[in-house]
């Protein structure tokens, strides 16, 4: 799947969006997170590194899109390998 984005933004595949978002998170955002942030959602704009954090993923997304209408965001959950689990799988959080 290819993400069709706003004006002047290149089309990226889901794999490219994921890789860029994770890189930005690891390098620029995760070092700022503390134990109190574990379990919160972070959405990262892969084009400029802008991000929002909230206990509610929809609220974080809405705030980012208000600031960056053409954002291409990747949602992550602080301390977890994925934002959402299905099928009863869980993991211990790790910052």
Image (cartoon, helix red, strand yellow):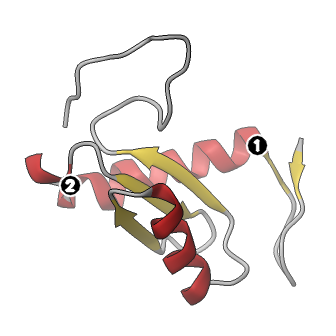
Between disc 2 and disc 1, whose residue precedes?
1
**Residue 58: x %, y % from top left:** 53, 62
Relative to 90, residue 29 above or below: below
Residue at the left extreme?
A: 35
Of the pair 80 and 26, the residue shown nearer to us: 80
Q: Which residue occupies 73% across, 79% down?
A: 70
Residue underneath mark 1: 14
Residue at the top extreme?
A: 88
Secondary structure of residue under mark 1: helix
Secondary structure of residue under mark 2: helix
**Residue 79: x %, y % from top left:** 27, 37
**Pointer 2 local density, CA inside 10 Å: few below 14, some 14–19, many at least 20:** few
Residue underneath mark 2: 31
**Residue 29: x %, y % from top left:** 31, 59
Q: Is residue 79 left or right of residue 52?
A: left
Q: Is residue 94 left or right of residue 3?
A: left
Residue 50, label in figure: none
Of the pair 11 and 79, the residue shown nearer to us: 79
């Amino acid at each position: 799947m290819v993400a069709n984005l706003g004006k002047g933004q290149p089309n990226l595949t889901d794999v490219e969006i994921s890789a860029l978002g994770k890189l930005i998170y690891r390098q620029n955002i995760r070092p700022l997170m503390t134990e109190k942030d574990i379990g919160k959602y972070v959405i990262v704009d892969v084009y400029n590194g802008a991000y929002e954090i909230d206990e509610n993923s929809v609220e974080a997304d809405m705030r980012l899109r208000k600031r960056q209408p053409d954002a291409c965001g990747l949602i992550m959950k602080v301390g977890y390998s994925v934002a959402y689990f299905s099928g009863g799988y869980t993991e211990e959080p790790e910052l």
